């Protein structure tokens, strides 16, 4: 019975990581986690309100999305420091997805957001169960970097309307800019003053406050925490000003009534039409959210020599989103800034997330009446300052210097995201990366090689001083052979030998060939036949184990006019025998 | 002036291949070409009528598609033996494309076919001019083989209605079968007798006639030609029977009035809506037609040590299709059977095609009244017998034995083509091939290698008896490193070293790495940092020229904790110095 139950326990722990870390949970861990939770809570309250606003949802939905989802992640997630909740990019994608459906009624809009959270949760969980985490790898680093930068610009631009106090709509940069421009004359001065002041204050907090506090001799950690509390201070001060001067009656947009109490129980709308329309956006939100979250989690885990399990992370984030959908929330994922704060504040286990949830719950139950006079401009300032740190054009320079193909992928992603919105941007970025990769592999690099004198090593005749034999041509094919490049190789070999009457043997050096698919096999057979017609033998060298296993299952090796050599050195020694001039 | 005009002449000849072969045109060549043209004309008349029927078009459009397009190909094409005209698969695709638009009115239907020919011609020409012929390589051999087989089945099934003399519709196998089944009771006995007799006769001609003629002592070439004339005989005999017994009044569907005279001048409908709807089908028809045509042309060219130029072939086929669209034709391409007949009959230059065009023109001007009583069942029999030779399930067995991935691509293509029609079938086949290829490369084979004793050659420790050093781990990565597998490598290296405390050096052997994109570069930087944290140095060996050039443009080599070795042998000699146990 013992080994069986051990096995079950191991399997259970794999699916419920909470069982692992909770066993060794101590009083010290508790203290660390609680301290981290308090700091993250202070940071998360204004962020939750602000990102709900960005998503086009009522402020309380941001709070609801920061309660049960955090508990769900604490149970199923594998990262010790990840802080889950509403984040900027996913909020923007949520707004774009629902706007595309043409929904404007607030009740319908909220229902769609809840359904989106549910779909996203279901997709993430299914991906986790079927170990489809590798799909996220098809989002290349340049595409992600370009997408995040462009999203940051879109988000910041979309918030300018709150700073100016005007109406403006749109989900692409041209739409947003032209809409803002058209409404510019309606700017509300009170709103503008509050908005600009809050933005300036928050920028100063981010850049100038910490050094100042350190100069006064404050401990770095305390200085850090105080600097993170900047947005809370901005919220408190501007709310008081709006209340004291009755700015709500002077045209300043304020948050208004935020319901007080526990998150409501909600259910996704199981309307097949709605689900069909939200499926693709939900998939994109899931993958983008997963990629962002996993990259933070991995960075933080590596710092403490811990590991995260990507497929289990999918389950953790899936559970969080399903939790969001049943408690009035909207799509969530692991946030970059708040996870770093959580980590720096000393969070040791996912329990810190659960304690944060308690903090936000308390806020939802007690503090919401205080938010009535909070100007939306303050929340917009919070968002702008947060997302401008996402904007980083250095990837363009970096990619330009390294590879024009990567540069094309980044710049297309940035331009298409800005010009046509987040969904087109991501889809085009992924499609372009794949297309460019396929294009490159469809015209592989082929090098003619010779021996580096005095070694058994063979290199490109154009790059190195090497020894060759005029009757033996060795071509090193620098790519796996598959349908897209099978015809190319056929033409290449033929072109090389027709112009050279001395050739009697062609060796294809397969050290870089990792696959030969059926199309390529047929091309190799054609090459073998054609060369035989010209009295030239075809040989292979350095064929890898898996490729050789595959070739043995076909009739190719029986028809091959030459031999298969273990190494290129052996091939040259055999083929150049009796011709010492070339062999040495 | 001389070299300049020579240069111009070479460029002109590249774009107008007729200028090359016409210079050395002799009386002997003329005789060969005329003989071949007569034989191909006899074969092409019934085929043109039959394929027009298959495409849902009036019989004369098949003839029109076999006149000017052949002349256009003779001017622009590079193959000496390719016979262009209406073919079975492209006719089926034409029918499917127009039916998808819901067009039933015959005039509109014909106009759509002419527009499709124009679009296809324009696409092919543009692809030729911009040298986009490589796009066809993304149709893998298994996908093409599966598609052709499934199309053959669809075509044969679609013709059964003519054999039975009933109405039946559909563009997928389930639709066709259920429609035929529903109308089975309406079978016309006269039609059935003619249809079955013609089919049986044509099968016998194909399989039994030639051996019989050879037995009588006839020369093989003459026997071959007589056997090819079978369809003409079937047409003549069944037409006479239908005329003599007044079968048209007994419910046998006959061809009826076929206009006599020159092909009409026509123009594509430049209706943007229609063009937008036909663009994707036209692209598919273009690519499928091009792939079929080029593979025949290449096979025949290789037999006579000639070459074809794929990008110029695109221009040739493009010109043919544009020619078809201005003379009342519909999409055409190079046909397999007729090109082989043309080749075997001795065609030496594309002029044979132009002579064939004259033959069909004569038929269109003089013979069409004779076709009035021709039963459609006879044409259906011609089609069935021709396309069943396309059906070849051996590709399934072949692919199963060689690679399960290729098998998946073939079987999906066959099933989806049969179940959902030609367009879905091709698109799904291509998408699946690409997806499976990407999946394979996203989880590359990584081998830990050691030295084959007494050589400088390094192979997989699991497959060969090799020498290794416990403090040095060498991993040979059998794939280019790009975004889809960058994360995989990172995990792999980490997993390998955490379990082994002895490791002090990791060598990544890059002999099979043909590319390192920006995503992979970032992963290499992460690996380098992580290993540095564990006091392990990272080295590279056998980095190829193009990859090294790329790495030098980044900061990676400055941060690399270890070295880059020219060869793996050098790496081991350096790293294992002072530890002779391992080095020898």
Image (spheres, coloured by chain):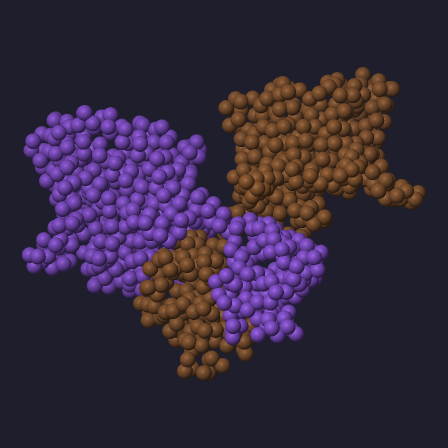
Chain colours: A brown, B purple
In front here: B466 or A438?
A: B466
Left or right: residue B344 compared with residue B430: left
Q: In this view, does B333 lie to the left or right of B242?
A: right
Instruction: Kindly indicate the quadrant of the structure image that contains residue A5.
Output: top right
At 61% from the left and 60% from the top, the residue drawn is B550
> Where in the figure is residue A158, as x and y percent of width and height?
69, 31
Name the residue rendered at 66%, 59% in the picture.
B501
Which percent across, then down, holds residue B189? 13, 29
Q: Position of residue A81 (x, y in %)?
A: 71, 40
Q: Which of B340 and B150 is in front in this view?
A: B150
Residue B279 image-quadrant placement: top left
* Front in this rendered view, residue B482 or B54: B482
User: Against B97, is A60 above or below?
Assistant: above
* Quarter placement of the N terminus of chain B: bottom left
Give the side of residue A322 with respect to residue B478, left or right. Answer: right
Asked if residue A193 shows in the view, the reply is yes
Which residue lies at the image location 49% right of the left edge and 48% below the top edge?
Answer: B438
Q: In which quarter of the image is the C terminus of chain B?
A: bottom right
**Residue A556 in which image quadrant:** bottom left
Q: Extreme front residue here?
A: A1
Q: Is residue B57 visible?
A: no
How many labels were placed on the picture?
0
Q: Which residue is drawn at 22% across and 41% down?
A: B383
Q: In x, y percent, where is residue B212?
A: 9, 53
């Amino acid at each position: 019975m013992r080994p069986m139950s051990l096995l079950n326990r191991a399997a259970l722990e794999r699916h419920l990581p909470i069982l692992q870390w909770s066993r060794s949970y101590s009083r010290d861990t508790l203290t660390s986690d609680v301290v981290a939770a308090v700091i993250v809570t202070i940071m998360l309250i204004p962020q939750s309100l602000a990102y709900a606003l960005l998503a086009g949802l009522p402020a309380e939905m941001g709070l609801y999305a920061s309660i049960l989802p955090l508990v769900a992640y604490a149970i199923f997630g594998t990262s010790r420091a990840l802080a889950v909740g509403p984040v900027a990019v996913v909020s923007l994608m949520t707004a774009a997805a629902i706007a595309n459906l043409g929904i404007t009624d607030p009740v319908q809009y909220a229902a769609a957001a809840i359904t989106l959270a549910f779909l996203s949760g279901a997709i993430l969980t299914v991906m986790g169960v079927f170990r489809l985490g590798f799909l996220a790898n098809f989002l290349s680093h340049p595409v992600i970097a370009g997408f995040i930068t462009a999203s940051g610009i879109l988000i910041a631009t979309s918030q300018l309307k709150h700073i100016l106090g005007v109406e403006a709509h749109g989900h692409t940069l041209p739409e947003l800019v032209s809409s803002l421009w058209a409404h510019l004359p309606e700017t509300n001065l009170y709103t503008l003053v509050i908005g600009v002041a809050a933005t300036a204050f928050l920028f100063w907090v981010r850049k100038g406050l910490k050094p100042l506090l350190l100069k006064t001799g404050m401990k770095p950690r305390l200085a850090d925490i105080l600097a993170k509390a900047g947005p809370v201070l901005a919220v408190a001060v501007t709310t008081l000003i709006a209340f004291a001067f009755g700015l709500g009656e002077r045209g300043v947009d304020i948050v208004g009534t935020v319901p007080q109490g526990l998150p409501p129980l909600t259910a996704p709308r199981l309307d097949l039409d709605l689900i069909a329309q939200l499926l693709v956006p939900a998939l994109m939100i899931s993958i983008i959210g997963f990629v962002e979250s996993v990259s933070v989690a991995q960075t933080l885990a590596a710092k403490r020599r811990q590991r995260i399990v990507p497929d289990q992370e999918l389950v953790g984030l899936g559970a969080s989103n399903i939790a969001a959908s049943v408690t009035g929330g909207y799509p969530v994922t692991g946030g970059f800034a708040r996870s770093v704060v959580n980590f720096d504040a000393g969070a040791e286990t996912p329990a810190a997330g659960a304690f944060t949830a308690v903090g936000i719950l308390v806020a939802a139950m007690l503090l919401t009446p205080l938010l009535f006079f909070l100007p939306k401009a303050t929340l917009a300032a919070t968002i702008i300052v947060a997302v401008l740190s996402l904007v980083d054009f250095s990837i363009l320079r970096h990619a330009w210097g390294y590879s024009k193909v990567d540069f094309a992928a980044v710049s297309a992603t940035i331009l298409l995201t800005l010009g046509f919105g987040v969904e087109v941007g991501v889809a085009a970025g992924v499609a372009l990366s794949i297309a460019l990769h396929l294009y490159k592999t469809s015209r592989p690099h082929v090098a003619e090689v010779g021996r580096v004198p005095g070694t058994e090593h063979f290199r490109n005749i154009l790059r190195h001083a090497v020894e060759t034999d005029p009757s033996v041509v060795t071509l090193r094919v620098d790519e796996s052979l598959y349908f897209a490049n099978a015809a190319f190789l056929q033409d290449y070999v033929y072109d090389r030998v027709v112009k050279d009457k001395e050739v009697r043997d062609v060796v294809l050096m397969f050290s870089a060939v990792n696959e030969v698919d059926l199309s390529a096999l047929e091309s190799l057979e054609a090459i073998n036949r054609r060369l035989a017609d010209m009295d030239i033998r075809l040989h292979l060298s350095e064929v890898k184990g898996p490729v050789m296993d595959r070739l043995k299952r076909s009739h190719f090796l029986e028809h091959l006019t030459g031999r298969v050599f273990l190494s290129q050195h052996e091939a040259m020694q055999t083929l150049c025998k009796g011709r010492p001039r070339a062999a040495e």
